Image (tube, rainbow, N blue to C red):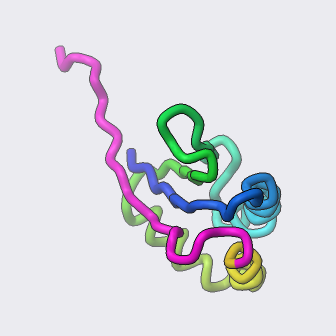
Amino acid sequence: MFIARWHLTANFGKLDDCVALLRRWQIDVGERIGWKVGSVRVTTGSVGAAPTALEYEVHFDSLNDLESAWKDLEGVPHHREYIKMFEGLMAPGSGVWTIHKEIDLTPND
């Protein structure tokens, strides 16, 4: 299992606007490329993290699934519009994707 995380920093006072826009993006774009609500998680900074930190996390079985989803983004016309809307709400250059591999800690018996 893999986890892709989009890290971004909201401009001061714009975190709620970023979350609201991300909710709309999830419906209009994320759902269309197969990112169902059950495989997605959104977190914000709390203790020890900036209160303007926002992360969108999606789970995948393989890197091929992730690459396929990213390729499908090109075919969703609303995606580019949303990116432009996000630009006014987030700190410039703060949007970064990281990919993580999930490790099972249960013993191999």
Query: Residue drawn at (71%, 73%), measured in percent from left and top?
Result: 86
* Residue 71 located left or right of residue 61: right
Q: Which residues are magenta?
A: 88-109
Query: Residue drawn at (63%, 52%), measured in percent from left and top?
Result: 52
* Residue 30 located left or right of residue 91: right
Query: Residue drawn at (49%, 55%), measured in percent from left and top?
Result: 5
Residue 8 among magenta residues:
no
- Judge by depth and name the residue closer to the eye, 41 or 31: 41
Residue 13, picture quadrant: bottom right
Residue 21, picture quadrant: bottom right
Which residue is farthest front?
12
Query: Residue drawn at (44%, 50%), measured in percent from left and top?
Result: 3
Where's the C terminus, which quadrant?
top left
Q: Position of residue 19 (x, y in %)?
A: 75, 54
User: Is residue 41 shown above or below 7?
Assistant: above
Q: Position of residue 68 (x, y in %)?
A: 49, 71
* Residue 5 located left or right of residue 42: left
Q: Main secondary structure of the magenta part?
A: loop
Where's the N terminus, which quadrant?
top left
Q: Position of residue 26 (x, y in %)?
A: 74, 59
* Residue 1 located left or right of residue 69: left
